[in-house]
Every structure is written in structure tokens, then in C-alpha cells.
């Protein structure tokens, strides 16, 4: 029997959670920074101590966040009539008191965009080793979900599809900028928990059951977000949330091929994915071959791990004791499969696709590594990239680019490396890079450094190059031919910004 809660009790429980202050801000205020940070690290005792005198909020913290057993009168005082929660398998009665049957966790989105913040609650399976080993385990919010949410373009859209919603994380975020949100999942239990998440959060989402795009057959959307089962391995399904049932990265390749048919013209899709690094193959070419015609695409690889680390990481994620005979047997079979497939590493990262609205438009496809820290996430970067490639497409002719006026991004810095020489320090290399957020960097020589210094939003590029030609004694045409490809890359990475062109 799946967890459930009817609309009436759902609204009442939501009111109780708000009244008790069981929100992200309320929990942080009760616990204090030190105990809250300890809880985030998986250390419960400081939070338990901090919640002792927390009244109803303390009861809810211990009940839902610390896997505690609380006296029934105290839980009733915090949540009111417990019968719907007990019958709906959200709570359970034990000889010692009331215990949570599910993880009900405060979650939210700040109002940094100028609007009000949002207080939500995510309902997932308990995060215990035993629970995580269940084939149909539904995970809560984790690093991957948070990364995707922080990377998603948040411009207003009419319709959005959350493909493989799990407990509903991306659907909740989508409700802030999409008029209509459809969320699908192949697992009925996931949809039941997503329904609880959305109901308690007061968010309306159209939830549908079925694999991949079957539940939305014949429909198109302005935006698609997905954290699909992306763990490459043998063709099996040990855990529904992570395993596709297809060998290696074949599921991701198939998904990318189908995306344009589910997008409106100009619609975008954003997802996480993993791909194999195969001996004798270039990984960008491998991923590029999956991309369908008629889409702009940006594939950003965040990390690459060797097969042993890949297998061990996902075994621990499933709550397995990696030293047990069962886990070792599984790891051996997994690594044998990697050897047969000539796998040298597994890459992980972000994918952004946009369906072209013009069949005559040459798409922009970029597959690259993403260096450095992300800061607050990739939302601004993804949005800016779409604007910048539109600007570059409008200035595809050299003459149009030469007529443009550019300025150096405020976060650009010039770094030089020097080594000992016969007359003291001698510069070995110079690099311009973005400080903060994605650390795009480009090596530059003397003329390029001078050109960037001159990009103050005052003179068109053609005049700056004419001045450089005179100052360095280089033919103008040769300087243009050598400079424009680099300028385009600097614009694409946000190091050079068009003046008055709309790109960020």
C-alpha cells in the first residue's frame, strides 16, 4: 500500500507545520549554525541537544530529521489528529511512541530574485542503509538534485516537464516560473511521495505514471528538466532511481535523441548525465554523436572518475557494506563489465539543449570541461550562454563582429606566470580568466592582452584592432584573422560582453 494523505488532512498538516515553524528558516534558527551544520554532515547529537527545549518545533525536528521516537501526546500537539498520518503510512505507532515512516523535510527557495521565498516540504523514504537497499527506494534531495535545480534556467514558461520526478524536487522549483508543470515517473511509489511533497507544499503539479516520454505522448513543452537514472553499468536495475536497465550510457543517448520531439520550437531541456570514457575514443566525439540535428547544445563535464571509484561510490550510495561478500561479488561483476567494454573512466556533468525555431539556423554545439567551483550554481551561466550564442549567431559575419562594441567582464582577471631568466623574472604565460563562478580561462599574448584592456565599451572592435595593428606593426587583415575566433570564444565564455546587445 502506497503512502497517501487526502487533501483535507494535507492542508491541515501544512498549517500545523507552518504554525510550529517547521520551515528551513525555523529549523536553522532553533538549532543554531553549529548544530545545523553537524546535522548536514550526518551528525545528529548536536541537533538533538539543541531541540530539547524547542517545544512543538523540537518535537518535529526529532521526529522527522533525527529518526526519533516521540510521545504520542507531543506529536498530537504538533500535528493534530494523527489517524490520517498513521493510516497514510507517514507515521507509525510503536510501543514506545510515534515514529516517522517517511522523511518529511523542510525545503525552500529564497526570494533572491526579488519575489517572496517559498516554504516547501519534501517527502521521501527514510535515509537508512536498510531503506536505501530497497529496489524502489525514493531518495530525498541530494547533491545531484540541488545541482540541477541551481543550474536550471528560470525564465517564465508556459509548460514544463519534470521527467523522472522522484520525490518532486524539480517540480517544486518549476512551479515558481512555469504556468503548468507535468511530472512523470515510472515508479508508483515515487509519484505517491511526490504527491505528498507537492500537497504539503501547496503546489499544483500534474503527476503521471509511466516510463520516459510515454505519459506525455503527443505533447510538447517549453522546458524539460530531468535527473534521469544515469549510472552507467551492466544492463540491470538494482535500484529504480539510478539504473536505467540499459547497458552503459545507452539510455542517455536514447533520451537525447527523443528530446527535440517533446520540445516546442525554442524550448530548452536541461539534465544531468554520465558518459563512458572508452579506450580509443574521444569522449566529446562520443557525446556529440548522440546529439540530434536542429538543437543548440552545451555539454559540461564536471568530473571524471576511474571505474573502481565509480563502482565504490554507487555501492556506498546504496547503503552497502563494500567489504561484504555480496557487495564484493557485485563490484567484481560490474568491473568485469567495465573491462569488457574498454571503459577507462566515467564522466558526469550537465547538458543543455535548445530546439531551434528556424530550420535554416546552424546549431551551436559545444562539448567541454567545466573548471573550478560553481559558486551559486549555473542558472545565470546557462541563461547567459543562450543569450551569448544568439548574439554570436547574429554577428556571424566578420564585418558584423568588427562593428560591435565590447567591454571586458567585471569579474575578468589577468594572471601571469613568470620564471627566472638571464635578466631576472621572465613572463612564461599570461591567462585571462573569470573570477567567481565557472572559471573559464584563456591564454593570451601581448596583443591580446592589450586588446582586452581596450575593450571598455567605447570603441568598436575594428578600431581597436587598427590601433593594435599600428602599435605592434602587424598587418591589419592578419590580426583580424588571428583575433576574431578568440574573440568569439571570449564572448561565449562571458569574458567579453557586447555593449547594448542583450547578451550577458
Image: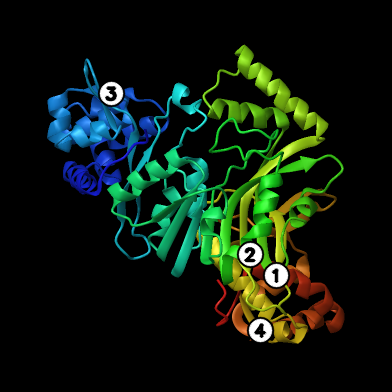
Q: Is residue 317 left or right of residue 23?
A: right
Residue 194 position (above or below residue 42): below
Q: Earlier in the sequence, mark 4 or mark 2?
A: 2
Residue 40 position (above or below residue 201): above
Q: Secondary structure at mark 1?
A: loop
Q: CA distance from mark 4 to mark 1?
A: 27 Å
Q: Earlier in the sequence, mark 3 or mark 1?
A: 3
Q: Are marks 4 and 2 in contact (CB under 8 Å)?
A: no
For label 2, the residue is: 260
Q: Quadrant of residue 312?
A: top right
Residue situated in front as seen by the camera: 310 or 194: 194
Q: Earlier in the sequence, mark 4 or mark 1?
A: 1
Mark 3 or mark 2: which is in front?
A: 2
| Position in image of residue 105 (x %, y %) | 33, 39
Q: Quadrant of residue 342?
A: top right
Q: CA distance from mark 1 to mark 2?
A: 8 Å
For label 1, the residue is: 294
Residue situated in front as seen by the camera: 244 or 394: 244
Q: Are marks 1 and 2 in contact (CB under 8 Å)?
A: yes
Q: CA distance from mark 3 to mark 1?
A: 54 Å
**Quarter occupied by the C terminus:** bottom right
Residue depicted at x 33% and y 59%: 111
Residue found at the far top of this picture:
325
Residue 39: in sight, yes or no?
yes
Q: Are marks 3 and 1 in contact (CB under 8 Å)?
A: no
For label 4, the residue is: 404
Residue depicted at x 18% and y 43%: 16
For label 3, the residue is: 68
| Position in image of residue 215 (x %, y %) | 51, 55
Q: CA distance from mark 3 to mark 2?
A: 47 Å
Question: Which disc, if any, is residue 30?
Answer: none
Q: For label 3, count other residues whose C-alpha is less than 10 Å away and answer few (under 14), some (14-19) or many (20+).
A: some
Amino acid at each position: 500500500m502506497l503512502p497517501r494523505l487526502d487533501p483535507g488532512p494535507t492542508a491541515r498538516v501544512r498549517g500545523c507545520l507552518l504554525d510550529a515553524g517547521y520551515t528551513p528558516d525555523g529549523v536553522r534558527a532553533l538549532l543554531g549554525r553549529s548544530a545545523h551544520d553537524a546535522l548536514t554532515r550526518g551528525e545528529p547529537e548536536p541537533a538533538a541537544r539543541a531541540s530539547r527545549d524547542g517545544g512543538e518545533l523540537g518535537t518535529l525536528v526529532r521526529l522527522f530529521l533525527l529518526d526519533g521516537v516521540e510521545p504520542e501526546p507531543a506529536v498530537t500537539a504538533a500535528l493534530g489528529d494523527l489517524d490520517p498520518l498513521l493510516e497514510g503510512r507517514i507515521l507509525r505507532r510503536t510501543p514506545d511512541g510515534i515514529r516517522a515512516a517517511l522523511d518529511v523535510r523542510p525545503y525552500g527557495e529564497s526570494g533572491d530574485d526579488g519575489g517572496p521565498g517559498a516554504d516547501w516540504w519534501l517527502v521521501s523514504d527514510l535515509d537508512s542503509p536498510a531503506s536505501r537497499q530497497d529496489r524502489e527506494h525514493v531518495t530525498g534531495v541530494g547533491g545531484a538534485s540541488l545541482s540541477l535545480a541551481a543550474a536550471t534556467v528560470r525564465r517564465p514558461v508556459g509548460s514544463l516537464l519534470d521527467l523522472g520526478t522522484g520525490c518532486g524536487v524539480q517540480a517544486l522549483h518549476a512551479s515558481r516560473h512555469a504556468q503548468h508543470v507535468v511530472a512523470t515517473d515510472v515508479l508508483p511509489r515515487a509519484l505517491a511521495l511526490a504527491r505528498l511533497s507537492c500537497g504539503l507544499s501547496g503546489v499544483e503539479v500534474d503527476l503521471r505514471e509511466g516510463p520516459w516520454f510515454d505519459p506525455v505522448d503527443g505533447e510538447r513543452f517549453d522546458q524539460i528538466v530531468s535527473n534521469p537514472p544515469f549510472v552507467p553499468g551492466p544492463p540491470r536495475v538494482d535500484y529504480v532511481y539510478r539504473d536505467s536497465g540499459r547497458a552503459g550510457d545507452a539510455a542517455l543517448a536514447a533520451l537525447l535523441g527523443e528530446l527535440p520531439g517533446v520540445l516546442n520550437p525554442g524550448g530548452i531541456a536541461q539534465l544531468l548525465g554520465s558518459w563512458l570514457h572508452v579506450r580509443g575514443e574521444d569522449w566529446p566525439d562520443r557525446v556529440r554523436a548522440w546529439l540530434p540535428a536542429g538543437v543548440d547544445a552545451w555539454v559540461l563535464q564536471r568530473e571524471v572518475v576511474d571505474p573502481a571509484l565509480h563502482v565504490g561510490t554507487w555501492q556506498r550510495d546504496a547503503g552497502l557494506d563494500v567489504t561484504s561478500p555480496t557487495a564484493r561479488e557485485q563490484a567484481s561483476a560490474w568491473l568485469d563489465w567495465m573491462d569488457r567494454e574498454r571503459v577507462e573512466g566515467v564522466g558526469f556533468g550537465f547538458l543543455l539543449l535548445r530546439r531551434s525555431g528556424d530550420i535554416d539556423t546552424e546549431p551551436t554545439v559545444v562539448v567541454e570541461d567545466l573548471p573550478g567551483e560553481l559558486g551559486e550554481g549555473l542558472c545565470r551561466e546557462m541563461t547567459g550562454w543562450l543569450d551569448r550564442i544568439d548574439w554570436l549567431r547574429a554577428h556571424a559575419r566578420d564585418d558584423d563582429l568588427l562593428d560591435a562594441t565590447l567591454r571586458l567582464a567585471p569579474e575578468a582577471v589577468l594572471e601571469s606566470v613568470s620564471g627566472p631568466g638571464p635578466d631576472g623574472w621572465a613572463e612564461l604565460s599570461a591567462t585571462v580568466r573569470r573570477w567567481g563562478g565557472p572559471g573559464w580561462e584563456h591564454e593570451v599574448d601581448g596583443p591580446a592582452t592589450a586588446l582586452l584592456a581596450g575593450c571598455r565599451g567605447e570603441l568598436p572592435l575594428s578600431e581597436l584592432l587598427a590601433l593594435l595593428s599600428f602599435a605592434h606593426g602587424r598587418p591589419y587583415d592578419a590580426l583580424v584573422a588571428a583575433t576574431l575566433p578568440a574573440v568569439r570564444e571570449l564572448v561565449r565564455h562571458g569574458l567579453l560582453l557586447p555593449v547594448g546587445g542583450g547578451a550577458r
